[in-house]
Image: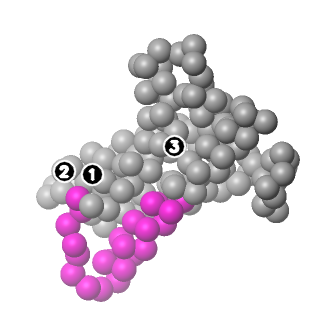
Amino acid sequence: MFTVSHKTIDRNFPALMYQLRAAELVACFFQMSHIGFGYFLLPTIFLSLEVTIVFSRWFNEIDGRYDFQQMTSERKDGYTKAQYACNLYGSVVLAVLVHCIAVDMESGLSAFVFGFADYVAILSAAFCAAVESFEGAKAKYA
């Protein structure tokens, strides 16, 4: 499935991105349900922003390869490049921020579900951004 040649990772690239973003959305919703809205305002804000970014990219099937190519374009101004970078890497940054800021929970099933969802969100966001960046770079510089 993964090749180093000039070919794409697989013909199922949109399906792979769809599944990764769906997994990240489910993980974010599990985190939101266990973190609560009253006591942990900052992680909730970051999770809400992450859900907004991931849901819009998942629902509209936005291609991150195009975002990477536009981000590395020489003709774009800094503000436009920053927008593309936020769209492409924002979910990774927000997932890591939630992981760093969220309060440690006591042991139990709730803590396990939150921790598991936390790591699933980080890994799926990072893998999705890495694959989209790799494919975008390969298409641009090939």
Q: Number of labelled discs?
A: 3
Coloration mode:
one colour
**Which dot marks residue 105?**
none
Q: Position of residue 65 (x, y in %)?
A: 66, 37
Q: Quadrant of the C terminus?
A: top right
Nearer the N terminus, badge 3 or badge 2?
2
Q: Position of residue 119 (x, y in %)?
A: 43, 68
Label 1 sits on residue: 44
Residue visible at 25% across and 53% down in the picture: 43
Q: Disc 1 to disc 2, how far (Cα)? A: 5 Å
Verify CB contact (< 8 Å) between mark 1 and mark 2: yes
Residue visible at 39% across and 54% down in the picture: 95
10 Å neighbourhood of mark 2: few (<14), some, or many (≥20)? few
Please tell me whether residue 116 belongs to the stretch shown in magenta. Answer: yes
Residue visible at 36% across and 63% down in the picture: 31
The picture quadrant where one finds residue 6 is top right
Please tell me whether residue 110 belongs to the stretch shown in magenta. Answer: yes
Q: Is residue 103 above or below residue 45?
A: below
Residue furthest bottom as drawn: 108
Q: Position of residue 63 (x, y in %)?
A: 66, 36
Q: Observer-nearest residue: 1 or 78?
A: 78
Main SS, magenta residues: helix
Q: Secondary structure at mark 2?
A: helix
Q: Is residue 59 above or below residue 102?
A: above
Amino acid carrying mark 1 in the image: Thr
Residue visible at 67% across and 39% down in the picture: 137
Amino acid carrying mark 3 in the image: Phe
Q: Secondary structure at mark 1?
A: helix
Image check: 107 left or right of 61? left
Q: Which residues are magenta?
A: 101-124
Label 2 sits on residue: 41
**Which dot marks residue 55?**
3
